Amino acid sequence: MIKIGIINQKGGVGKTTIAFHLAYLFSRANKKILLIDVDPQGNLTSCFKEALPKENHIKLIYEGQIPRPLEVDKNIFLIGADITLSKYEADAKLANFFKMKNLLDNLSGDIAIIDGPPSLGLFTSNILLASEYVIIPTDMSKFALLGLRDLLDSIENVKTNTNKDLNVLGIILSSVQERLNYHKEIINDVVREYKELMFKTILPESVKVKESISKGRPVFDIYPDAKISKAYLELFEEIEVRLNGKR
Ligand SMILES: Nc1ncnc2c1ncn2[C@@H]1O[C@H](COP(=O)(O)OP(=O)(O)O)[C@@H](O)[C@H]1O
Ligand SMILES: [Mg+2]
C-alpha cells in the first residue's frame, strides 16, 4: 500500500479538500483507497457521513483497538474522526507515536490517504512515521509560507531519525487568484525557494469547490469544465508521474 499523508500545521490551507478529491481521482483509476481522517474537526468524515459509527473511528488506535474501514463510495474506505479524538492529542507517550504505522501495516488497499490536523503534535507525528510520501498544501498567506520551513525541517528530522522512507511528494499552492499581483509575487517567491518540491499545477480559488463538497461530490463531477476541475486532473497526473518516478 502506498501511504500518502496530507499535512500542514496551518488550518484552512486545503488539506481536507485535496484528500477528498485525490480519493476520487485514485478510485477512478481503479485503486482501492483507504482514507483516514486524523483531524478532531472531522471535516473529511463530514464529507461522507453525518455520524460516524464507533467501530470506524481512528481514536480506537489509541484505545488498543483496530478501527474498521467503512465503505463510503466505490473503492473508497474511510476511517473517520470527530471531536472525541481531540483528547488523545495530549497523550504523547512514546507508544502512541507508531499507532498509525501499526494500523496501516495491518490494513489492505492500494493507496492510503491520511488527512492531517492543523498542528504539529502527536497526530501529525503519527502521519510522518506512517507515510512514505507527504503532500503539503499551502494557501497564499504569508503565515502559511513562513510555516513551510518549520514543517520541512520536522519532516527532515523524522526522515533522518525514524522514517527513512519518508519523502515530500510535493508542495501545492491552493486557493490561488492568479490575477492578483500579490499572489503572483508569492508564486514567484515559493517557486524560487522550493523549486523541485513544488507541483507545477496550482489550484485556483473557486467557490465551486465549497459548493460541490457541500453536496458530497468532487468538483470535477459537478463542473467538469471548470478551471479548478482541470487543475485537479493535472495535479493527479503530476502525482502519478512522481509516484512512478520514485518507485
Ligand atoms: N480551490 C479552492 N477554492 C476555494 N475554496 C477552497 C478551495 N479549496 C478549499 N477551499 C475551501 O477552503 C476551506 C479550507 O479548506 P480545507 O480543505 O478544509 O483546509 P484544511 O483541511 O487545511 O483546514 C474550506 O472551506 C474549503 O471548502
Ligand atoms: Mg482539514
Image: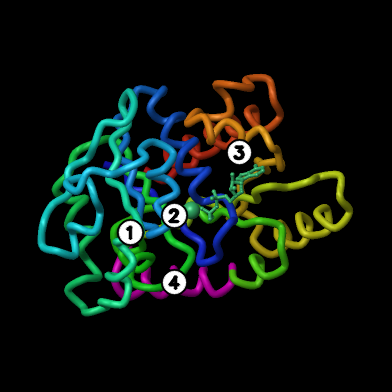
Q: Which residue is mark 1?
A: 165
Q: CA distance from mark 2 to mark 3?
A: 24 Å
N-terminal label among 4 and 3: 4
The residue where tag 3 is placed is: 210
Q: Quadrant of residue 154?
A: bottom left
**Marks 3/1: CA distance?**
34 Å
Q: Tell me, yes or no, whether the highlighted magenta stretch contains residue 125.
A: no
Provide the secondary structure element on which disc 4 rests: loop
Give the side of residue 94 with respect to residue 129, left or right.
left
Whether the residue under disc 4 has CB within 8 Å of ligand 1: no
Q: CA distance from mark 1 to mark 4?
A: 20 Å
x and y percent of residue 34 in the render?
30, 40
Residue 174's spot in the image, x, y percent?
A: 65, 48
Residues in magenta?
148-165
Q: Of label 1 and label 2, which has the lower sequence position?
A: 2
Q: Residue 53, which numbered label? A: none
Q: Amino acid at mark 4?
A: Leu
- Mark 2 surroundings within 10 Å by alpha-carbon count, few (fewer than 14), some (14 through 19), many (20 or more): many
Q: Nearer the viewer, residue 90 or 149?
A: 90
Ranked by sequence position, the earlier of labels 2 and 3 is 2
Q: Magenta part mainly helix, strand or loop?
A: helix
Q: Quadrant of the C terminus?
A: top left
Q: CA distance from mark 1 to mark 2?
A: 11 Å
Confirm if mark 3 falls within 8 A of ligand 1: yes
N-term mark: 1 or 4: 4
Give the residue pinned by disc 2.
134
Q: CA distance from mark 4 to mark 3?
A: 26 Å
| Residue under the image location 47 percent in, 58 percent down | 7
Identify which amino acid the numbered label 1 is placed on: Asp
Decide: few, some or many residues near mark 3? Use Cα within 10 Å; few <14, some 14-19, many ≥20.
some
